[in-house]
Amino acid sequence: TDLRPLDILSEVVPPSGLARGMRVFQVQGVRGFQLAASRPRTLGFPASRLFIHCDHFPEEFSIIVTLRVLSVPTKRNEYVFTLMAEESPGVLVGLRYAPDKLHFLFWSQERAGGWQTCVTFPNVSLFDNQWHTLVLAVSGESFSLTVDCSIPKDVVVETPFPTSLSVKRASFYLGNRRRRKGLFTGLLRQLVLLPGADATPQICTTMNFKVAMLSVPTVLQDLPAKPASNEVLKYPYETDTKATLGSRPPCTKQEKARLWFNASQRGLYLCNGSAWISMLEVKQRLDYVEEYQNLVTNSETMGIEVFTIPKVGLFAATANRYTPPGSAIYKWTDGKFVPYQNIPTYQAQSWKYFTIGKKIFLAVANFEQNDRGQEFSVIYKWSRRKEKFVTYQRITTHSARDWEAFVIEGEAFLAVVNHREGNNHNVDSVIYRWNPRTGLFETNQTIPTSGAYDWEFFTIGPYSFLAVANTFNGTSTKIYSHIYIWLNGSFQLFQSILTFGAADWEVFRIGDRVFLAVANSHSYDSGMLAPSNFYTINSSIYELNITAQMFVKFQDILTYSALDWEFFSVGDDSFLVVANSFDGFTFSVNSIIYRWQGYEGFVAAHHLPTVGCRDWEAFHTAEGSYLLYSSAKEPLSKVLKLKTT
């Protein structure tokens, strides 16, 4: 021979396609042949096709095999390949495996009548549902097996491999010994005979030893993910990959070609090595909203925060008006929120959940002083041992309304909205920076605000922004709210927008478009005549204009003392729900869900009866999608379920 690799596997594959009894499967992103049991002889070919210039098997050689083995019953052998003479049932050369063993067979004609020798390699475990590459090197009495380029297993036997093993009128058979018994049931990717050399140095040069390649049939080599234009795959292949159920799993190179079935959205996704690609998805559409749970609260609720603690569960924190009994945390249990923990608060306005590394925090904005006349807002830390939130840090605040947590360039920040100090509404709100050395938040920057209600942090490309909702400057609610941009280590003024008792900012994205919605609560100016209704006014949606580098008004929506916007999606549809709290006559006012209608903007879709609605939160569970609203006028919040079609 000329010492070229002899690709046994490729000889069985005709140029026009696959041979009968062969199917291509892809597992873990790697393709292999599955061999059928009906007609073993069809998976054979004459040895003369490989040994063109010589009719003897090489005296020294390596056999390279890449396979994926299925579990086999005890005491059962399966053949990877055999070389057999046409007139004899004996195996001239063969390779078979049993549980925890690999056997190499050869026929020695040096003895009278011939003799079959079996070289056994013990403790070879291939039944782990993984691909493996084996290199069997043969030289005289020495036999060496290397599995996945690990330390070789060496065996020396009394009977050497014959120096002149005739292959006249002999044939190779793939995965069998010319009969159905012992048929190979796994997947075979590579089967190569390399005369005259130990192939280990050639094979063990790649990082992925388990699928190292010396010579692989074209049909099994990587194909383009999609055929060009209308071309169909020349070699169709199948896969036995299993579909993962549940929440979104990771998609990396290890998960390539795996499937994920999202039961809640009825979607089937394929991992391409970096992202989940939708293959089949039934897009849900919001049909109607139904009342799901009446959540009795400690007292009137000013704000709510829904959050998930990994490996613990879904929670909702309510910011309640009175102490005692303070505010409460509820846990989602058996499809309902149930009381979990009470925390003393002082006319709490809002909660903010955030994490720093593995630490989990929950900050409350207290509006009033405690029993000792001290005015603190408090950061609580989740205790994994107690499975409760415990006091972590107290921060002096002034009629705090809201917390916002965010990260810029790897550093954690926490911003508080100070509403007023005594009767003075023109006070500084404060941005705190996390000090990893002390494990505490420290003052980083102060920003002048006027009776402010809300912070909203967002990013656009590499830029970070912080918007404040200014509500009242002592004489008027018709004042400017401001958007700040992070430059050179601090927030600097980016844009000012005229608002009317602004209570909330909500940033959201639809496609590549960025929007910012303000909830205007009332229009009052001590120096002007009173309007017919302070509370029936427009709230506005602004859109970022990249060319002008500013937010411009996109749409006005008539609201009734709006205190909150919440953006959410159902399928491909986008929605905004507004918290209407008072129309000038009654607190029993419909809050409204608006559906995104493209060129038309947001159009009213659902009218929801609410009482003094203060805050909305959208959340999802395995059972579906929900809205939770808090009432600032009665000790009852409601969970609403979004019914979809």
Image (tube, rainbow, N blue to C red):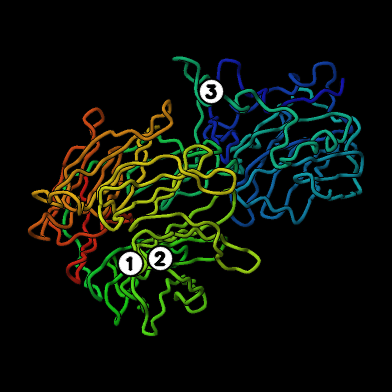
Tag count in the figure?
A: 3
Badge 1 vs badge 2, beta-carbon distance below 8 Å: yes
Q: Read off the residue under disc 3.
A: 235
Front tag of 3 and 1: 1
The residue sitting at the bottom extreme is: 372
- Residue 342 on image: x %, y %: 35, 78
The amino acid at mark 2 is Gly
Residue 353, image quadrant? bottom left
The residue sitting at the front extreme is: 527
Q: Left or right of 454: which side holds 557?
A: left
Please tell me which of labels 1 and 2 falls first in the chain.
Answer: 2
- Residue 425 on image: x %, y %: 34, 61
**On-image quarter of the C terminus:** top left
Q: Read off the residue under disc 1.
A: 332
- Residue at horizontal 43 percent and vertical 74 percent from the top: 376
**On-image quarter of the N terminus:** top right
Front tag of 2 and 3: 2
In the foreground, 438 or 339: 438
Disc 3 from disc 1: Cα separation: 50 Å
The amino acid at mark 3 is Tyr
- Residue at horizontal 64 percent and vertical 27 percent from the top: 44
- Residue 301 on image: x %, y %: 25, 68
Disc 2 crowd rating (10 Å Cα; few below 14, some 14-19, many 20+) is few
The numbered disc on residue 313 is 2
